[in-house]
């Protein structure tokens, strides 16, 4: 069940025997960043756990996180620069988990690695896509980046890391051709940053309709630019960015927020809006509600398609009279705006899914249309590919 091929039974057994250092070494054989996956991985391993056939799965993700946290605590997780260098140079474009994992592997082999990142901080999705309450940017992401820096990986951020945008070679980013000329290999690990939009829905241009990743990215940047993330964060939220041309963070305080999309990104938008002080948060999902247990056509060890309640859903209940913030089997017909182009609501219709010749077809239910109020909408509909 693990795409990384983690040696789960081995380090689970070592933990039960209190052999934490050996467990750490086994974990690091297949996973470059257990401090990341131990926090944000959806844990397909637990869905494929044999124990899950008759009981709750082993808490593999929690064990993984405990191992790497123990390694930091004991000082086992520290810089280990390669003893020799091969003389070969590799450029990596993109500093998300894929780019960082490649940089870590190639550097350990002795190659000289430079990672280029167009954002102002290293980490890609782990830095700006995942909210701070889910993965701390200083104590988790930057801590590991600093270890890689001490091991010899070179990081270039901002304008100088935005490959192909300038190409003049004068303190700005090199062109793609310059990268190829100056390195033995170039690796593109730019991620799938193009979000799925709803441009065909009338009213999409209303002020207040945003892509989910814009909301999450600007929020985390405002938080980090302010310099502190503890209690009272709002007083310095966004105060560290003095660029008047930079987009401002989107504030959900006191607003009715609608999140369209039921995945991890949507859940993170819900949790962020709750922390902003949203008046209410509603989560719309096109698909029907999943069953509490595996359906007959979803046997072990396939990923269990069951009803899940994440931290954002739990927190949003406090704003919804202790009711679930989610509404299933609904389609958005229109974003409703006022005469000034500001979002005021959404026109929805309930749908059902019919099996037509083996294919599931969405059918609108007549007479089910309704309009719900909204001040902000965040589109969390997945990603279509790289830019």
Image (cartoon, rainbow, N blue to C red):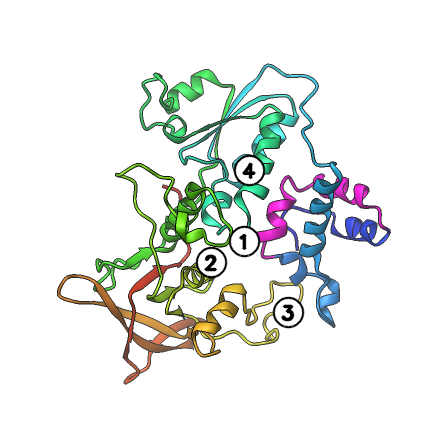
Which residue is at 52% across, 19% downward? 184
Contact, mark 3 vs mark 2 (Cβ under 8 Å):
no
Secondary structure at numbered mark 1? loop
Q: Residue at x 54, y 65 (%)?
A: 310
- Image disc number at residue 125: none
Residue 94 visible? The answer is yes
- Left or right: residue 220 versus residue 23 is left
Check disc 1: other Cα within 10 Å, few if <14, some if 14-19, many if 20+: some
Gap between marks 1 and 3 measured at Cα: 30 Å
Cα separation between marks 3 and 4: 40 Å
The residue tagged 4 is 142
Q: Residues within 10 Å of mark 2 (few under 14, many from 20)?
A: many
Q: Are marks 1 and 4 in contact (CB under 8 Å)?
A: no
Give the main secondary structure, helix, strand or loop, of the magenta stretch: helix
Q: Which residues are magenta?
A: 18-42
Is 58 a magenta residue?
no
Instruction: Please tell me whether residue 51 is drawn above or below residue 363 in the rendered image.
Output: above
Residue 299: mark: 3
Q: Earlier in the sequence, mark 3 or mark 4?
A: 4
The residue pinned by badge 1 equals 134
Give the left or right position of residue 333, taking residue 319 as reference. left
The quadrant in which the N terminus is found is: bottom right
Q: Earlier in the sequence, mark 1 or mark 4?
A: 1
SS for callout 2: helix
Q: Which residue is mark 2?
A: 268
Q: Is residue 161 above or below residue 315?
A: above
Q: Residue furthest top?
A: 87
Residue at image point 34% right, 65% down = 254
Cα distance, mark 2 to mark 1?
9 Å
Separation of residues labelled 2 and 4 (CA atoms): 21 Å
Secondary element under disc 3, as helix, strand or loop, is: loop
């Amino acid at each position: 069940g693990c795409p990384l091929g983690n040696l789960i039974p081995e380090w689970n057994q070592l933990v039960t025997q209190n052999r934490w250092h050996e467990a750490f070494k086994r974990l690091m054989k297949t996973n470059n960043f257990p401090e990341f996956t131990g926090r944000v991985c959806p844990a397909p391993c637990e869905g494929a756990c044999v124990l899950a056939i008759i009981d709750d799965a082993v808490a593999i993700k929690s064990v993984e996180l405990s191992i790497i946290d123990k390694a930091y605590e004991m000082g086992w997780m520290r810089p280990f620069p390669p003893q020799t260098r091969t003389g070969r140079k590799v450029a990596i474009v993109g500093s998300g988990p894929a780019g960082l994992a490649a940089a870590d592997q190639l550097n350990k082999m002795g190659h000289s690695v430079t990672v280029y990142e167009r954002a102002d901080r290293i980490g890609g999705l782990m830095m700006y896509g995942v909210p701070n309450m889910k993965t701390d940017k200083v104590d988790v992401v930057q801590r590991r980046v600093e270890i890689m820096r001490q091991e010899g990986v070179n990081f270039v951020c901002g304008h100088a890391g935005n490959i192909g945008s300038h190409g003049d070679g004068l303190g700005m980013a090199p062109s793609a051709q310059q990268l190829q000329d100056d390195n033995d290999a170039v690796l593109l690990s730019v991620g799938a940053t193009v979000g799925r939009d709803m441009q065909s829905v009338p009213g999409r241009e209303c002020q207040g309709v945003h892509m989910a990743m814009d909301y999450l990215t600007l929020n985390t940047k405002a938080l980090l630019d302010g310099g502190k993330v503890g209690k009272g964060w709002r007083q310095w939220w966004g105060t560290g960015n003095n660029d008047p041309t930079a987009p401002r963070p989107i504030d959900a305080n006191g607003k009715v927020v609608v999140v369209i999309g039921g995945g991890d990104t949507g859940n993170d938008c819900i949790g962020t809006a709750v922390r902003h002080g949203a008046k209410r948060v509603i989560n719309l999902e096109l698909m029907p509600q999943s069953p509490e247990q595996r359906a007959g056509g979803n046997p072990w060890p396939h990923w269990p398609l069951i009803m899940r309640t994440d931290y954002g859903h739990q927190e949003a209940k406090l704003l919804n009279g202790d009711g679930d913030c989610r509404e299933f089997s609904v389609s958005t017909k229109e974003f409703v705006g006022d005469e000034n182009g500001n979002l005021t609501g959404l026109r929805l219709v309930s749908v059902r899914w019919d099996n037509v010749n083996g294919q599931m077809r969405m059918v609108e239910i007549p007479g089910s249309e309704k309009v719900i109020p909204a001040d902000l909408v965040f589109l969390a509909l997945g990603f279509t590919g790289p830019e």
